[in-house]
């Protein structure tokens, strides 16, 4: 029995009466190295959990506060005979965190779609019911409906893209991709970006860069999204510049995109790749952002076994660095 309990990954105890007869390594680490032989009421100070343990019957209970405050656990009690029970403490924190992420995502997505949909419905209703509108007003209302419909379409397209990327996250890409070609494609794509006419895009691509193993379409999407952000927030004056560079650094290809915009306060940096996270929600929506671009970038880079780094100084600008592994032997 001791060997079986020790093999359990989560904290597990054998309780006989009021005494802890045996505790496996995770239980000793969480509750104290010397808990064997002690009164269970001193080790597990949770009334509801103790009630289930001391009842000496099979039961399961979700509680918080064992070991550390607010951490959720499922206490699983199984009678093993002779008045003893096996108590397992199953950590519910990862499941609770995943559920919170899911709930937050659904709430954020619903909000992002509801806002333009409400605008569309309101203006469409006015167009349908008010026959006294002038031709100019009808054109203006129609343009508002068109703009918000296109915004909804962008959000839905980004959500679908994120879903496809997550579905493929365990499938290693197999194409040999020229990063220089990817950058040149994205620079050509950037000509249509709102605000791109106000600044200059410079590129510095090292010669003879080795290929990376990747999904070319997804890597183009990465650079497209990063350039879009750089233009959206960095092209604030007519003489602004966006610098794109690619070099080899050991076994990595380093791609950097630098703007000289207003920069990002430090407290926001850890959350930039969260879905729908925005520093300035109103400005992001006005400039056409969906709040999903960096989340998409993060997931694509993770699929490619690379890394993403964002450094920014308020008043100076922002540099985003993507590192991708070169093909072995290159």
Image: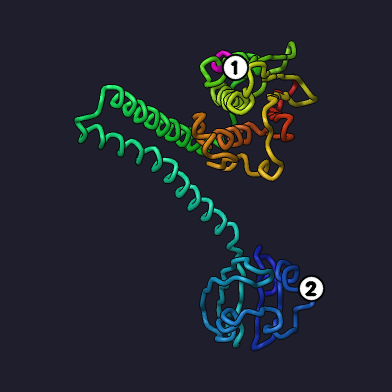
Regarding mark 2 in the picture, which secondary structure is present there?
loop
Question: Could you say which quadrant of the image residue 70 lies in?
Answer: bottom right
Regarding mark 1 in the picture, which secondary structure is present there?
helix
The reply, left or right, for residue 166 in relation to residue 38 is: left
Decide which of tag 2 and tag 1 comes sooner along the chain: 2
The residue beneath circle 2 is 33
Q: Position of residue 231 (x, y in %)?
A: 60, 23
Task: Identify the residue at horizontal 77%, vertical 73% (top origin).
Answer: 32
The residue beneath circle 1 is 198
The magenta region covers 186-190
- Regarding residue 215, the answer to whether it shows in the image is no
For the residue pair 80 and 249, the one nearer the viewer reads as 249
Q: Residue furthest top?
A: 207
Q: Position of residue 63 (x, y in %)?
A: 57, 72
Is residue 71 a member of the stretch shown in magenta?
no
Task: Identify the residue at horizontal 71%, vertical 42% (top origin).
Answer: 266
Task: Identify the residue at horizontal 67%, vertical 19% (top origin).
Answer: 240
Q: Quadrant of the C terminus?
A: top right
The reply, left or right, for residue 234 in relation to residue 193 is: right
């Amino acid at each position: 029995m001791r060997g079986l309990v020790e093999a359990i990954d989560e904290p597990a105890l054998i309780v006989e009466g009021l005494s802890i007869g045996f505790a496996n390594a995770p239980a000793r680490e969480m509750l104290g190295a010397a808990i064997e032989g002690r009164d269970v009421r001193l080790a597990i100070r949770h009334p509801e959990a103790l009630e289930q343990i001391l009842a000496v019957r099979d039961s399961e209970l979700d509680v918080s506060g064992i070991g550390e405050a607010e951490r959720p656990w499922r206490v699983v009690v199984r009678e093993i005979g002779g008045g003893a029970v096996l108590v397992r403490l199953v950590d519910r924190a990862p499941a609770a965190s995943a559920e919170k992420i899911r709930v937050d995502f659904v709430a954020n997505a619903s909000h992002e779609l509801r806002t333009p949909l409400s605008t569309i419905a309101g203006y469409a209703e006015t167009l349908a019911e008010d026959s006294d509108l002038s031709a100019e007003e009808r054109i203006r209302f129609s343009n508002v409906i068109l703009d918000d419909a296109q915004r909804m379409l962008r959000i839905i397209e980004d959500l679908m893209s994120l879903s496809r990327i997550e579905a493929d996250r365990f499938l290693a890409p197999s194409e040999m991709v020229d990063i220089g070609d990817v950058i040149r494609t994205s620079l050509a794509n950037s000509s249509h970006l709102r605000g791109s006419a106000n600044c200059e895009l410079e590129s510095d691509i090292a010669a003879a860069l080795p290929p990376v193993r990747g999904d070319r379409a997804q890597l183009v999407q990465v650079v497209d999204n990063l350039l879009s952000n750089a233009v959206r927030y960095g092209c604030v004056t007519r003489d602004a510049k966006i610098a794109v560079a690619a070099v080899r650094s050991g076994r990595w290809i380093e791609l950097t995109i630098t703007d000289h915009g207003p920069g990002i306060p430090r407290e926001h940096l850890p959350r930039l790749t969260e879905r729908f996270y925005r520093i300035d929600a109103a400005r992001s929506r006005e400039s056409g952002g969906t709040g999903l671009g960096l989340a998409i970038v993060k997931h694509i880079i993770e699929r490619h076994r690379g890394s993403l780094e964002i450094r920014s100084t308020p008043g100076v600008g922002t540099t985003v660095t993507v590192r991708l592994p070169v093909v072995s032997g290159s």
